[in-house]
Image (spheres, rainbow, N blue to C red):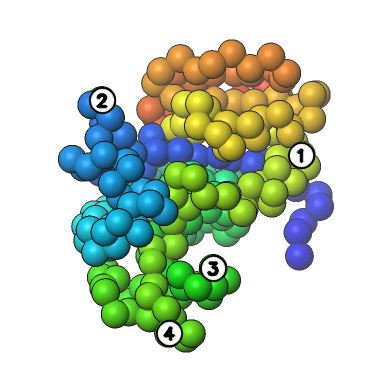
Amino acid sequence: MIDKKKPQIVVLTGAGISAESGIKTFRDSDGLWEGYKIEEVATPEAWNEDFIRVLNFYNERRENVKMAKPNGAHFDLVSLESEFEVRIITQNVDDLHERAGSSTILHLHGEINKSRSTSNPNLVYNIVGSQLNPGDKCDLGSQLRPHIVWFGEEVPNIVIASDWVSNADILVVIGTSLQVYPAAGLCRYLPLNKPIITIDPKPLPFIRRNEVFHIQKTAVEGVKDLWPLLEKFHI
């Protein structure tokens, strides 16, 4: 049961928070992801063209995630739960928020440690180990694919995320450029009288609707500044 007495903080996290744990960001400066074009490994067309290549690609990413560990930013977000109801919406597919101990997490773009049926998207399974292989099938007998939202696919959890933001007392945005939709549009759902805190070493796009305070630091360093800001906003 949700404690209605606690102020509600919604935290939107992106690649920047995972990067400090050694998980590479989605795109490198040359537009490639681990040497692959996005169209080769992260679209339904890529799966239809060469599903073994896609499986191998995500098997390698899964190994990387298992080697990574939650960093100080992940743990500092958990500590906020002592005073606030904290809901985390993450664009990341890793499980670092879970391993740090956050209570309420919504994955917008899927989860790399899970697979789902290619015939029924509601059939989702935990991956044992780090490998998802050709011949691994769902209960209906269909090949399993990574439980990842690829380019060109709908983002089913965006409806839940929008509802969370619309009921928040404050929105905290960490490690994301706010340039990738539909996640970037979540700020529009925050009530006009509620503030936004952004944490990213780079300047972010101007947000017209709400009072915004930008902490121009990395996730690990920036999250340390949250407590005094929450007091400033009387949260």
User: How far across and down, in percent of the image, does residue 150 sit?
Assistant: 44, 49
Q: CA distance from mark 1 to mark 2?
A: 34 Å
Tag 4: Cα neighbours inside 10 Å, few (<14), some, or many (≥20)?
Answer: few
Q: Residue at x 29, y 80 (%)?
A: 135
Residue 157 horizontal side relative to residue 214, left or right:
right
Q: Which mark is residue 29?
A: 2
Q: Mark 4 or 1 closer to N-term?
A: 4
Q: Are marks 1 and 2 in contact (CB under 8 Å)?
A: no
Q: CA distance from mark 4 to mark 1?
A: 40 Å
User: How far across and down, in percent of the image, does residue 230 sit?
Assistant: 65, 30
- The number of discs equals 4
**Residue, disc 1:** 166
Q: Amino acid at mark 3?
A: Pro
Q: Amino acid at mark 2?
A: Ser
Q: Amino acid at mark 4?
A: Gly
Q: Which mark is residue 121?
A: 3
Q: Mark 4 or 3 closer to N-term?
A: 3
Q: CA distance from mark 4 to mark 3?
A: 13 Å
Marks 1, 3: nearer the viewer: 3
Q: Mark 3 or 2 closer to N-term?
A: 2
